[in-house]
Image (cartoon, grey):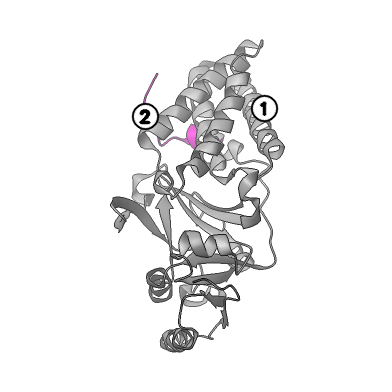
């Protein structure tokens, strides 16, 4: 078995496109809020980008392991199927999935929440209220980026229902098995390459999709995630990662531009509202935000104070 996961070929591009078929774009009409520290807000305003952390360095590793475990469990069941091709294909996909997680794969994630003033978010992402919730218009972000210019980035709603998670995984496995068989029947002489490319693309897809699965225990968060796979087909497309200290850990992150086309004026993020955390001086916060936006020469978003009390 070859160890290299990603490769450049027309076949790879074709089967990966098949893996993405039937995907529906998540819709949401309200603002999505990114909870961040004062340093984080300053970076967002100055650079007009959002930081995404490499998935294995997130605060709670169980969040990531949860989706991975469910995906592996479903694939393992398929690997025991009585149909030989399904069994072989699922085992190969499992192999690549494990290889991606142990060696090559870099998946960067940043989180948003549908709720603008949530205690658990203030505690988890702003040092117990010493920060801000930045509200962005999701529709403006999505409409300003098509799949090609957005690379492998995705903005996805987190799924908390276990039955729905399993259904999505099974649906994608069934789809890729069916489509790979069709391709092989058309190109018998290229059977091995089609088989491997299809299994790799499915593993690649499921690995990213698993990052939008969480336990129902976290459902109050109503979370959305920006997911960026930083190992594209062409090395020239890879974003150079940066590093910061989080407590005692050197943590890799990316600066992701969510607004990359002419639809977003001057690449300015569509921030419509900023909620000031419970432990921040509200008057000073309003003044500093206003001055920052005057420098950007754009309309100042609505600034609101958190209604939650934290000591």
**30 in magenta:** no
Residue 171: quarter of image = top right
Rendered view: 310 above or below 157: below
Magenta stretch in the rendered image? 1-14
Residue 263 image offset from top left, x and y in percent = 56, 71
Q: Position of residue 67 (x, y in %)?
A: 56, 38
Give the residue at x 60% y 76%. Answer: 307
Q: Which mark is residue 4?
A: 2
Residue to which mark 1 is pinned: 174
Q: CA distance from mark 1 to mark 2?
A: 25 Å
Seen at 70% across and 34% down, the residue is 167
Give how far across and how far down residue 77 sits, in percent: 62, 20
Q: What's the residue at 52%, 16% (across, down)?
A: 189
Q: Is residue 295 left or right of residue 218?
A: left
Task: Please state which of residues 83 and 120 is positioned toward the viewer in this rendering.
Answer: 120
Asked if the residue under mark 2 is in contact with the one under mark 1, i.e. CB atoms within 8 Å, the reply is: no
**Residue 3 shown in magenta:** yes
- Residue 305, position in %: x, y? 56, 80
**Which label is found at residue 21?**
none
């Amino acid at each position: 078995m070859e160890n290299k996961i990603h490769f450049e070929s027309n076949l790879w591009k074709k089967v990966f496109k098949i893996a993405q078929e039937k995907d529906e774009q998540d819709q949401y009409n309200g603002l999505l809020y990114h909870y961040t520290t004062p340093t984080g807000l300053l970076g967002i305003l100055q650079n007009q980008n959002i930081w995404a952390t490499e998935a294995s360095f997130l605060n709670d590793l169980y969040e990531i392991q949860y989706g991975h475990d469910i995906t592996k469990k479903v694939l393992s069941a398929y690997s025991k199927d009585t149909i030989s091709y399904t069994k072989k294909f699922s085992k190969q996909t499992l192999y690549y999935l494990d290889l991606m997680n142990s060696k090559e794969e870099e998946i960067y994630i940043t989180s948003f929440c549908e709720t603008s003033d949530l205690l658990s978010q203030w505690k988890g992402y702003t040092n117990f209220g010493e920060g801000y919730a930045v509200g962005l218009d999701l529709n403006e972000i999505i409409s300003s980026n098509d799949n090609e210019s957005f690379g492998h980035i995705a903005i996805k709603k987190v799924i908390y229902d276990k039955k729905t998670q399993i259904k999505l995984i099974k649906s994608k496995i069934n789809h890729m098995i069916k489509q790979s068989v069709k391709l092989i029947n058309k190109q018998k002489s290229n059977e091995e390459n089609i088989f491997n490319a299809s299994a790799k693309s499915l593993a690649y897809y499921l690995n990213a999709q698993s990052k939008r699965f969480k336990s129902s225990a976290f459902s109050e968060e109503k979370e959305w995630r920006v997911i960026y796979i930083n190992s594209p087909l062409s090395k020239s497309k890879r974003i150079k990662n940066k590093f910061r200290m989080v407590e005692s850990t050197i943590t890799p992150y990316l600066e992701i531009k969510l607004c990359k086309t002419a639809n977003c004026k001057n690449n300015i993020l569509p921030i419509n509202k900023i909620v000031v955390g419970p432990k921040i001086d509200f008057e000073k916060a309003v003044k500093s935000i206003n001055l920052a936006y005057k420098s950007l020469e754009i309309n100042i978003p609505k600034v609101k104070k958190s209604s939650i009390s934290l000591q």
